[in-house]
Image (spheres, helix red, strand yellow):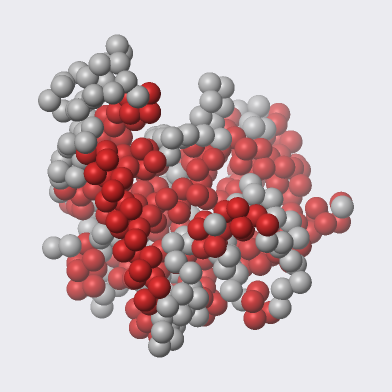
Amino acid sequence: MSCCNFLMKNSGTTELNDFYPIRPECIADVPATRFKPRSGKTLSARRWHAAFDGEGRLDIAKVLRRIQRGGVHPSIKGVVWEFLLGCYDPNSTFDERNELMQRRRGQYDMWKAECQKFVPTLGSGKFLTTPLIGEDGQPTDPSLVNLTTSDKKVVQWMQLLHQIGLDVVRTDRALVFYEDEANQAKLWDVLSIYAWMDNDIGYVQGMNDICSPLVILIENEADCYWCFDRAMRRMRENFRCTASSMGVQTQLGTLSQIMKTVDPKLHHHLEDLDGGEYLFAFRMLMVLFRREFSFADTLYLWELMWGMEYNPNIFAKYEDPDGAKTKPVSAAVNNKVLKQYGKFERNTLKTGHTEENNALAIFLVASVLETKNKRILTEAKGVDDVVKILGDITSSLDAKKACTEALKIQKKYLKTKQTAA
């Protein structure tokens, strides 16, 4: 049974295990899930469909209000996320979106066919975990690859594929979904095609954790790829590696500035412990709290974040980056338009602070640190103690409360910056 049909069949139940079943032998080892769809708060399938007009234009303000109150019902998460991540313009019609979808699917099929010429395993329902290229730059098993060129891009891409395969094996192993090799292969295919298209960054461990929920929620592989591409537009720089640094360190630097502003006492304590670079928060930002929440709670957290960060210009920004750069951002936006922005983005717009690195995830980490403020100040004698204290939050964090606290910290931070300016 397809993932989509499975979800729709079970849309009347609030039992999340019906949507994301856990392997029986893993139930004791996974964090408990706190999120439950709530009538009147969670965006339901009925309210979602009612938010479209006759031609298919979406009332995004109405949808955002509901998402920020109670998340999205599991039966419609995939299609809602496509809008939250900027795959589609809320002001587009059904026909316009269908045309765009078909064009994108054709584009993906073309890229995949190009990759299959080199590695026929792609698209076969199987995936590889053994190196395809040896240290000498030659195929380790000529039967698995068609290497008729010394093109550096092709060779480098092939060298990534077994690492992607190894990470696929480790991804969300507790879920019944990945007991099926075809589903693992779908994840491998999407990540492999993405690595082919992104010559600059390619593939870095952790991308599998971002892609996996999309593979589960979105049945069509091409649609899944485009949704992952949009998710990576937000996070791509975090995965940029050099010999001496990771891109996420830019966000860690922003976290340091935020904590220094909103809680100087805690910040200085962390500096005294040699934790002023906030490297202990590295994983939280890299994979958006995948380790701190259960699978279902992670999805809830992400849609809360993306709803709060939503900007109605996101589709145009991704479709025409150069055009979007020339469009001025005005703080004098009328209230009707302002409602089309998420709460976090609205706060940013009102104050005129539009720094690229001020993502909600950074303020979320700050809110987690604030909840552990007393323990860190009194118990932490070194960075290892900080790591242990933060490690205790698994399954005890409430996604909605964490986001609410993050918004409060954002307001305090922006107000302090305005006053200083």
In the drawing, does residue 302 fall left or right of residue 156? right
Q: Residue furthest bottom?
A: 54
Q: Please tell me in which quadrant of the rendered image residue 277 appears.
A: top right
Q: Please provide percent x and percent y for residue 306.
A: 51, 61
Residue 224 appears in the figure: no
Residue 352 position by quadrant: bottom right
Camera-side residue of 239 and 287:
239
Question: Residue 244 appears at what percent x and percent y?
Answer: 56, 22
* Count of residue discs: 0
Q: Which residue shows up at 70% across the image and 35% down it?
A: 269
Q: Is residue 1 visible?
A: yes
Position of 278 compared to 225: left or right?
right
Name the residue: 15% across, 43% down: 124
- Give me the residue at 38% from left, 28% from top: 153
Nearest the camera: 247 or 420? 247
Q: In this view, does 354 lie above or below 76?
A: above
Residue extending furthest toward the front = 149
Left or right: where 156 falls relative to 118: right
User: How far from the left and from the top, in percent, is residue 233?
Assistant: 50, 49
Q: In this view, does 376 lie to the left or right of 158?
A: right
Q: Which residue lies furthest to the top in this view?
A: 136
Q: Residue at the spot x=20%, y=28% of the render?
A: 146
Viewer-side residue, 19 vs 399:
19
Rendered view: 3 above or below 385: below
Q: Locate the N terminus by quadrant.
A: bottom left
Q: Where is residue 203 in the image (x, y as percent from the top left)?
A: 39, 35
Front-most of residues 360 and 110? 110
